[in-house]
Image (tube, rainbow, N blue to C red):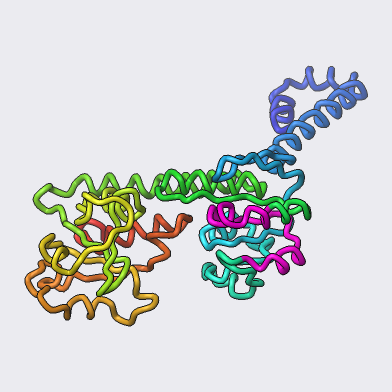
């Protein structure tokens, strides 16, 4: 319509008079055009949340969701965070006992964790239930019971990389009718991660730091090797993972760690141990470790470096500032 009005304004007086002679016909035609434009706009608006949709979940199952889910329950913290980030948190009626972010989760009914409260879940009867691969592998009969009760069940795969996390965000976005929001979240994460990589490329090889990551405290010290979020984050900031020769989560002895001579030590268990930095600095036989000598021991929020959700980008940004404070101010 705006284009039509602009054309009318540009017409000469003679043309306008001519149009007035056929006002009725033109008005009728314009009304038809307006209706067509409005119909086109409405069609575009409904594409985003069109249902039914068929979603392929984390274990390869095709799940058809007939209508926009008005109520959602989640049995794992990462999915809960994703739902809230997508703007669908007001639909959440059940969360796992480990869901701790955002703070609104504290007011939502707890429905279990790996051990589900099946009776409670059935009584709540959410339109959509987000579960983890563990449930699929160990409680498939219960999941079938949910489906028979009319609950759409989506299984989340074990995401261990940024790309797999992006896929999960897209999947939940599609299932909840928030695909546009999912696209925006993933694009923002990708752009922020690329900015970090670009800044990290300016770090000279001789200034590259070796980082030891502790995901479990002494005496049973565990770290993360290749195939983990932390390893991918360290690569992104141009740091060396002291356990880069390993894969997954592995255990080291204190003697083995000392020989690695890390420049920085990062712990992720401060949420259940008070002042882990002080514990590391006080370890016998660690005084010659560069990270201890220079008191470069830091604890980070475990959830931001291990939970496959939108806050992963916050985790890598935090690591960048801790490991290279002069580069990432």
Quadrant in the rendering for residue 260: bottom left
> 93 or 34: nearer the eye?
93
Q: Is residue 68 left or right of residue 138?
A: right
Magenta stretch: helix, strand or loop mostly: helix
> 74 or 30: nearer the eye?
74
Q: Residue furthest right?
A: 24
Q: Position of residue 150 (x, y in %)?
A: 77, 52
Q: In this view, does 175 lie to the left or right of 97?
A: right
**Residue at image point 66% right, 56% down:** 129
> 145 or 192: nearer the eye?
145
Q: Is residue 115 left or right of residue 143?
A: left
Q: Where is residue 234 in the image (x, y as percent from the top left)?
A: 27, 53
Q: Which residue lies furthest to the left in this view?
A: 288
Segment colored magenta: 116-143
The correct choice, above or below, for 171 with respect to 113 in the image is above
Q: Where is residue 322 in the image (x, y as percent from the top left)?
A: 25, 64
Q: Where is residue 157 in the image (x, y as percent from the top left)?
A: 51, 49
Residue 139 highlighted magenta (yes or no): yes
* Screen quadrant of the N terminus: top right
**Residue at image point 40% right, 55% down:** 313
**Residue at image point 42% right, 64% down:** 303
Quadrant in the rendering for residue 115: bottom right
* Screen quadrant of the C terminus: bottom left
């Amino acid at each position: 319509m705006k284009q039509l009005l602009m054309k009318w304004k540009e017409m000469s007086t003679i043309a306008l008079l001519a149009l007035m002679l056929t006002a009725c016909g033109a008005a009728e035609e314009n009304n038809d055009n307006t209706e067509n434009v409005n119909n086109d706009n409405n069609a575009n608006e409904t594409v985003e949340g069109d249902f039914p949709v068929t979603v392929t979940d984390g274990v390869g199952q095709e799940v058809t969701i007939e209508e926009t889910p008005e109520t959602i329950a989640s049995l794992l913290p990462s999915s809960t965070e994703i739902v809230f980030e997508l703007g669908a948190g007001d639909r959440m009626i059940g969360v796992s006992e480990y869901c701790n972010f955002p703070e609104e989760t504290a007011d939502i009914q707890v429905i279990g964790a790996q051990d589900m409260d099946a009776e409670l879940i059935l009584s709540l009867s959410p339109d959509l239930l987000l579960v983890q691969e563990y449930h699929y592998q160990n409680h498939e009969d219960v999941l079938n019971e949910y489906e028979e009760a009319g609950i759409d069940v989506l299984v989340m795969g074990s995401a261990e990389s940024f790309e797999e996390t992006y896929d999960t965000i897209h999947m939940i976005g599609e299932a909840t009718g928030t695909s546009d929001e999912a696209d925006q979240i993933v694009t923002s994460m990708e752009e922020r991660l690329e900015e970090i990589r670009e800044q990290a490329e300016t770090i000279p090889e001789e200034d590259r730091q070796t980082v030891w990551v502790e995901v479990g405290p002494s005496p049973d010290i565990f770290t993360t090797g290749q195939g983990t979020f932390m390893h991918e984050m360290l690569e992104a900031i141009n740091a060396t993972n002291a356990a880069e020769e390993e894969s997954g989560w592995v255990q080291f002895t204190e003697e083995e760690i000392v020989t690695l001579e890390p420049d920085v030590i990062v712990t992720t268990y401060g949420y259940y141990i008070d002042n882990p930095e002080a514990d590391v600095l006080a370890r016998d036989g660690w005084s010659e470790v560069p990270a201890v000598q220079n008191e470069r021991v830091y604890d980070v929020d475990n959830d931001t470096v291990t939970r496959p959700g939108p806050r992963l980008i916050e985790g890598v940004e935090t690591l960048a500032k801790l490991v290279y404070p002069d580069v990432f101010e």
